[in-house]
Amino acid sequence: MSSSDYRIIDLFAGIGGIRLGFEKHGCKSVFSSEWDEHAKKIYKDNFGEEPFGDINLIEPKDIPDHDILLAGFPCQPFSIAGKGLGFSDTRGTLFFNIEEILRVKKPKAFLLENVKRLTTHDKGNTFQTIKNKLENLGYHLHYKVLNSLEYGGVPQKRERIYIIGFLGKVDFDFPEKLEGYKPLAEILENDADIESKYFLSEEIKNKRFEKLKKEPPMPSIWHENIGGNISALPYSCALRAGGSYNYLVVNGVRRLTGREMLRLQGFPDSYKINVPYTQARKVAGNSVTVTVIERIAENLIKSLNKLD
């Protein structure tokens, strides 16, 4: 089979970052699901289809046949930024929807994405449960934590675990580290073109500069941690859906625009943003790094071709 013959489904689709990565290699989407109304709106504007809503409201047997299941399933139950409740959080149980779809539809392969902490949550028991359930369905697993800074060529430090499964034994390699990443200068818009609402008040700006310990690189994105310390780096810390408005600050003076956030996630400039800024921040923080997915997809398809 050629990659253009592979059918994908896009679960917990967000704004379609995983789908974009696989479509670059010719895969065709036959089903998508996302419950967030703002994400659905962006998805429809960019892909021409509105995702099905709550995944709990469709029977696995009614989902179209597909070759590759894709799912960036909700990460808040396992994240450091969240409460880390895991499967005791109702969102954490959505993994079991994936398990049931895999059991019923038996696609040839899948890609799951989640936060790095998934591997250590509950002393590793949560991840072991996930692995056991996937292997009991007959899938052979490959998994690795990849940093977007090192594997996606974008200036964002974003560590995520990627779990690959094949319905059959096959060699699979995650992509190699890249030599470097795109400089911030190619991501950031010109300050002169930015609306005034993005700029910090003098009070907040002065507080940021007072906390800075050394001369910042230029350009830089400033990050304030829980302890109130400021780091000015030539790349961004991970975008977060629930981050404060001043969590990440460009050169200490303004917030990131929606376009800049999507660029940090590897989205092309042709990707449309049709929601308010508050929602753009949320969906960008919940998304995946498209360029990392593109590289994983290329290797996954090569391995899948060996199974056919």
Image: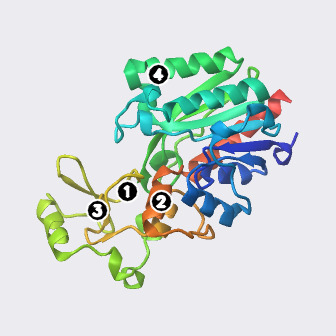
Give the Cα distance between marks 2 and 4.
30 Å
Question: Label 1 sits on what residue type?
Answer: Ser
Viewer-side label of 2, 4: 4
Image location (x, y in percent) of residue 178: 52, 47
Image location (x, y in percent) of residue 91: 50, 36
Question: Label 4 sits on what residue type?
Answer: Thr
Q: Residue at x 86, y 44 (%)?
A: 5
Q: Earlier in the sequence, mark 4 or mark 3?
A: 4
Which label is found at residue 126?
4
The residue carrying pointer 2 sits among few (fewer than 14), some (14 to 19) or many (20 or more) residues within 10 Å by Cα, namely many
Which label is found at residue 246?
3
Q: Residue at x 71, y 30 (%)?
A: 101
Given residues 150 and 95, the one toward you in this image is: 95
Give the Cα distance between marks 1 and 3.
13 Å
Give the Cα distance between marks 2 and 3.
17 Å
Q: Earlier in the sequence, mark 2 or mark 1?
A: 1
Q: Secondary structure at mark 4?
A: helix
The residue identified by callout 2 is 264
